[in-house]
Amino acid sequence: MLQEMMTVVNQKEIAPDIFEMTLSGELVKEMTKPGQFIHIRIPRSDLLMRRPISLAEIDHSNHTCKIIYRTDGEGTTVLSQLKQNDLLDVLGPLGNGFEIEMVAPGDVVYVIGGGIGIPPLYQLGKELFAKGATIYFLNGFASKEVVYYEEEFKKLGELFIATDDGSCSIKGHVGNLMEEIVLQTKTPKAVFACGPSGLLRSVEERFDNHPHVYLSMEERMACGIGACYACVCPSKKDPAKNKKVCDEGPIFKSGEVII
C-alpha cells in the first residue's frame, strides 16, 4: 500500500452522472488483483473523508488505472470536475481482490454485477479472459440510459443485460436474469458478484454450498486500512464477531459474512 499524488490522464462522462477517470503513477505497480480499490482524498479542504472507489482497469504497461464512479454527493461531484494533469491524493491499493486461481481454460464462470458495482468486474473479466475461461456477464442497470461498457464486456465474453424498466434487454433485476442463464449453461466453476446487498444475497442463495462464490461488498468506510471499524459486517459463522470490509474484504466467500 502506498500514498501518492497520482496524475489525472483523462476524464469523461460515459453515461449520465457516471464518469470514467484514468490516473497514472507509480502506485499502479502495486495493483495486482482485480477487485482491489483505492481510497481517494477529495481535493477540497472541507471534505475530509476519503472515498473508496474500485479499480475498473489496471494497465501496468502504461502505469495507468481507471476508475468508474457515479456523482451522488459533493465529494464525487468535485472529483468529476478534475481535468487532465490535475493531481489527486490516492491511497492504495486496498482490499484483498478476487481469487481466480482455481479457474482453468474452458471453465464456465459467471460474473454478476449491478449498477455502479459493475466497474471492478471489468478488470476481473480481462483476467478471466486471459486464463481462457468461458465468461457469462450478467449486468443489471436501472435503465438503458445508464448502461455503460457494453462493448467492452462483449469483447471478453457473453453479455446479458437486465434493466429495471425494461428499456434495454430483459426487464427486471439481475436475479431474474441469473435464473434464465443457469438453465442455458453448464454449472459454473466459479461465480463472482459485486453490487447492492439484494443482488449479493440472491447470488448467495442461488448458489448455496457452491465452493467458489465470491461476493464484493460495498460499504461506507473511513480509514480504509482496518483501524476505525466503520465498515464492519457480522461474521456468518459467529455473529458475535465482525469482519472489516476494508482490509478483510471487500470480497468474501459466500457464507463468510451476513449480507
Image: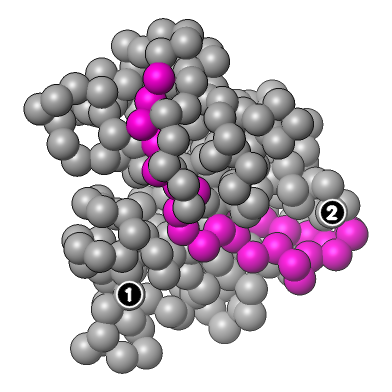
Label 2, secondary structure: give it. loop
Q: Which residue is mark 1?
A: 243
Q: Is residue 226 left or right of residue 120?
A: left
- Point out residue 66 in the picture as x, y percentages from the top left corner: 55, 29
Residue 27: image quadrant is top right
3D distance between C-alphas at marks 2 and 1: 31 Å
The one of 162 and 127 positioned closer to us in this rendering: 127
Location of residue 23 with respect to 3 vertically, above or below: above
The answer to whether the residues at label 2 and label 1 have Cβ atoms under 8 Å apart is no
The residue tagged 2 is: 131
* Image position, residue 2 (x, y; %): 46, 47
Where, quadrant-wise, is the C terminus in this rendering?
bottom left
> From which residue to which does the magenta span run?
87-113
Query: In percent of the image, x 43 and y 79: which residue is there?
Result: 256
The mark that comes first in sequence, 2 or 1, is 2
The residue depicted at 62 percent of the width and 54 percent of the height is: 33
Kindly tell me whether residue 37 is visible in this rendering. Answer: no
- Residue 155, compared with residue 128, is above or below; it is above
Amino acid at circle 1: Lys
Q: Would you place residue 198 above or below residue 145 in this image?
A: below
Q: Residue at x 49, y 31 (%)?
A: 67
Badge 1: few (under 14), some or many (20 or more) residues near its Cα, within 10 Å? many
Q: Residue at image x 54%, y 15%?
A: 9
Horizontal relation, residue 108 to residue 205: left or right: right
